[in-house]
Image (spheres, helix red, strand yellow):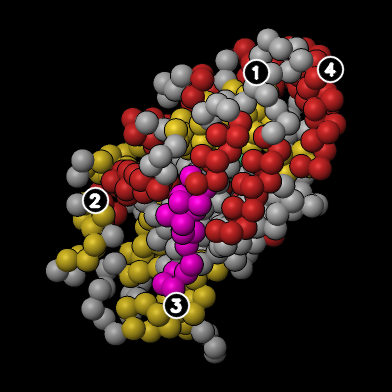
């Protein structure tokens, strides 16, 4: 977001005007920011065959998914529905990785029919896969390196109690199943969680995967998942992409030499690509002074942006209607009948009822985690591309919510 002559803009588009034009609450995504983030990753791994698979659960509007395709990205999907959206968006099946967890084998079979790459996350599915397909369908195996990473226990998925992946200590058993059924394992995968602070933790996981690679002879790629952290507030540590890039590249080259074949290096970033591109514009409905606090109640809440409530996530908030007023302390809260604080004790330029507030870094896990709680409708979505704000999702209506309910005539 740029501030120029007291007006905030994003991708060259004035934000207050956009709020007026499309109404609030409104999600806005800037294509240029997505490209900038995409390029950062590409530049950090110059000497390896790098492939990025956008993890579309972060933000699944088909226009965003198509835009990432236009940048050269593949797609990481976690449900058969995401696979189908990816195919609709025009991805080649070979560019889609399907990384489900605890799904029925019937869903895996469907994904095989679509021709996408299957990432297997448990022994039971591996056995069924081997029994069904033998060596006719290659697959990837999701290993769990048991590394405690991730900013919050809810988003750590690689630790010892995690439900994700097959334990790296079970490689001997994997090998036995693979050899028995002659399964063609073309990739190894790990994903240890979101918001990884320490690049070294990430690298330790990578080294374990390198070690495991020696047990498989058909490998074509290694997938190191994601977890790249972005900055939500000033002073936040972000994942040092260049440090990870240098170290992983060096180790990866050693590995491929040892392995005797050049492998592709894959990542599946979600948040890193789209978080900073997004803002959620909301309107201040009421300014409410209590004995201890001044609340700003806005026309949104946990139903549109769940991260503060679910992960204690911090999202910067700016009053874009008043860029010069004196700063006061507010708690910004939603209109849901829950304590849905969006920002606690925030210094904002004085807020008047009717002002538009921008909640930053709302591109990832914003809209995709939204709900109809309290029978509220979901916001519209706008994409800024080539200096133009384009509506990419209509605002939901009450009819949309009632559409699937059946009145049994009571
Ligand atoms: C969610 C997820 C990602 C993306 O994680 P981010 O923290 O958003 O980058 C990547 N891979 C898998 C398997 C995931 O489940």
Foreground residue, 392 or 31? Answer: 31
The disc, 3 or 1, on the residue closer to the chain's N-terminal end is: 1
The residue tagged 2 is: 11
Q: Is residue 102 above or below residue 362?
A: above
- For the C terminus, the quadrant is top right
Q: Is residue 161 left or right of residue 238?
A: right
Residue lying at 69% horizontally and 18% vertically, measured from the top left: 184
Q: Position of residue 52 (x, y in %)?
A: 46, 36
Does the rendering let one see residue 400?
no
Foreground residue, 50 or 65? Answer: 50
Q: Is 188 part of what is drawn in magenta?
A: no
Crowd tier of the residue under label 4, counting other residues whose Cα lies within 10 Å: few below 14, some 14–19, many 20 or above: few
- The nearer-to-camera label among 3 and 4 is 4
Does the rendering let one see residue 207?
yes
Disc 2 element: loop
The range drawn in magenta is 233-249
Looking at the image, which residue sits at the far left? Answer: 5
Residue lying at 74% horizontally and 51% vertically, measured from the top left: 146
Mark 2 vs mark 3, CA separation in Å: 26 Å
Mark 4 vs mark 2, CA separation in Å: 55 Å
Q: Is residue 55 left or right of residue 193?
A: left
Q: Are marks 3 and 1 in contact (CB under 8 Å)?
A: no
The residue tagged 1 is: 138
Ligand 1 placement by image quarter: top right
Q: Position of residue 233 (x, y in %)?
A: 44, 69
Mark 3 vs mark 4, CA separation in Å: 60 Å
The residue tagged 3 is: 346
């Amino acid at each position: 977001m740029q501030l120029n002559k007291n007006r905030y803009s994003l991708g060259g588009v004035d934000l207050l005007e956009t709020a007026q034009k499309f109404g609030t609450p409104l999600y806005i995504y800037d294509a240029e920011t997505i490209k900038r983030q995409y390029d950062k990753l590409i530049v950090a791994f110059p000497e390896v065959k790098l492939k990025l698979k956008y993890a579309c659960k972060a933000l699944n509007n088909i226009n965003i998914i198509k835009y990432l395709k236009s940048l050269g990205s593949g797609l990481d999907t976690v449900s058969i529905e995401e696979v189908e959206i990816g195919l609709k968006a025009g991805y080649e099946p070979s560019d889609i990785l399907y990384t489900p967890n605890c799904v029925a084998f019937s869903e895996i079979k469907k994904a095989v029919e679509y021709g996408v790459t299957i990432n297997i996350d448990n022994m039971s599915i591996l056995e069924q896969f081997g029994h069904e397909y033998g060596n006719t369908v290659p697959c990837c195996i999701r290993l769990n390196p048991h590394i405690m990473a991730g900013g919050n226990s809810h988003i750590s998925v690689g630790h010892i109690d995690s439900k994700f992946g097959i334990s790296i200590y079970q490689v001997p058993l994997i090998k036995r199943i693979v050899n028995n059924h002659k399964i063609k394992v073309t990739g190894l995968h790990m994903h240890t969680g979101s918001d990884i602070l320490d690049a070294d933790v990430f690298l330790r996981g990578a080294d374990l995967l390198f070690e495991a690679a020696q047990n498989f002879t058909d490998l074509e790629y290694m997938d190191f998942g994601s977890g790249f952290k972005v900055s939500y507030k000033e002073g936040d540590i972000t994942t040092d992409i260049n440090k990870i890039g240098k170290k992983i590249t060096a180790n990866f080259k050693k590995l491929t030499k040892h392995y005797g074949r050049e492998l592709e290096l894959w990542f599946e970033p979600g948040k890193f690509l789209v978080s900073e591109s997004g803002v959620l514009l909301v309107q201040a409905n009421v300014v409410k002074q209590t004995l201890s606090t001044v609340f700003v109640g806005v026309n949104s809440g946990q139903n549109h942006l769940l991260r503060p409530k679910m992960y204690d996530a911090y999202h910067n908030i700016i009053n874009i209607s008043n860029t010069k007023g004196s700063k006061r302390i507010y708690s910004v809260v939603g209109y849901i009948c829950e304590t849905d604080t969006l920002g606690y004790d925030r210094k904002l330029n004085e807020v008047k009822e009717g002002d538009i507030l921008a909640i930053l870094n709302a591109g990832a896990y914003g809209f995709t985690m939204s709900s109809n709680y309290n029978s509220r409708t979901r916001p519209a979505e706008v994409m800024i591309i080539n200096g133009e704000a384009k509506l990419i999702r209509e605002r939901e209506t009450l009819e949309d919510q009632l559409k699937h309910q059946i009145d049994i005539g009571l």
